């Protein structure tokens, strides 16, 4: 398992965990000062606290896959259209519904959104909008499984501890016309 922190100008410090050339965890970049002030913005994955050093590239000894993913993330947050949906990720979730949500959400294109109900329907359970919301709230593969593209039926909805402004910023970065 390789864990690396990476920095994205204007966004902050993110964290990536990779095992067997698959992303198993990704924390979105967050400004360092805010992360220190807000204890809820610390990593919540197994192995938290490890790999806290900041690097613009993957640490020495890590695979070229990690370096490529870090470069891809930096390009994404710089506004470039990069194929994040093609990065291999660990979609082994605790329920088959969550796995189907993750798989379906990876097909929602950049600049588009779906409602929680639509995500549930794409995952084969059209009446499970609340369960789709639970999936998004518990997701640990931000950007690779783009839960920021899931919106409430009556507006943008929330975005957990990152907040609605962060969600708007991601959607605007991807060209979603109603993000702001």
Image: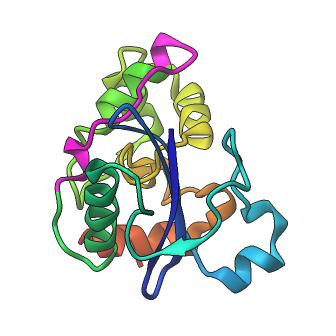
Residue 19 x %, y %: 44, 35
Residue 154 x %, y %: 50, 53
Left/right placement of residue 32 relative to residue 100 reads: right
**Start and end of the magenta stretch?**
83-97
Q: Quadrant of residue 85?
A: top left
Q: Is residue 20 above or below residue 157?
A: above
- In this view of the protein, can residue 109 be seen by the observer? yes
Left/right placement of residue 90 relative to residue 166 reads: left
The C terminus lies in quadrant: bottom left
Residue 14 x %, y %: 52, 66
Q: Quadrant of residue 124?
A: top left
Left/right placement of residue 86 relative to residue 18 reads: left
Q: Is residue 42 above or below residue 113?
A: below
Q: Check residue 94 for magenta coloring.
A: yes
* Residue name at image x 46 percent, y 51 percent: 142
Q: What secondary structure prevails in the magenta region?
A: loop
* Residue name at image x 61 percent, y 70 percent: 53
- Could you say which is closer to the camera, residue 41 or residue 70? 70
């Amino acid at each position: 398992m390789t864990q690396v922190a990476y920095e994205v100008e204007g966004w902050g410090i993110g964290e990536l965990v990779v095992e067997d050339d698959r992303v198993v965890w990704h924390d979105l970049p967050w400004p360092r000062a805010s992360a220190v002030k807000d204890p809820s913005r610390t990593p919540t994955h197994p192995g938290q606290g490890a790999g806290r050093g900041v690097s613009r590239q993957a640490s020495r000894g890590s695979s070229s896959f990690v370096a490529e993913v870090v470069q891809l993330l930096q390009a994404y947050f710089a506004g470039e259209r990069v194929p994040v949906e093609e990065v291999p990720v660990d979609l082994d979730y605790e329920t088959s519904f969550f796995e189907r949500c993750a798989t379906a959400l990876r097909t929602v294109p950049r600049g588009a959104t779906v409602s929680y109900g639509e995500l549930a329907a794409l995952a084969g359970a059209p009446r499970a909008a609340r369960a789709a919301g639970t999936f998004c709230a518990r997701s640990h593969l931000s950007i690779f499984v783009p839960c920021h593209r899931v919106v409430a039926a009556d507006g943008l909805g929330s975005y957990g501890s990152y907040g609605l402004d962060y969600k708007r910023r991601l959607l605007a970065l991807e060209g979603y016309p109603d993000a702001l």
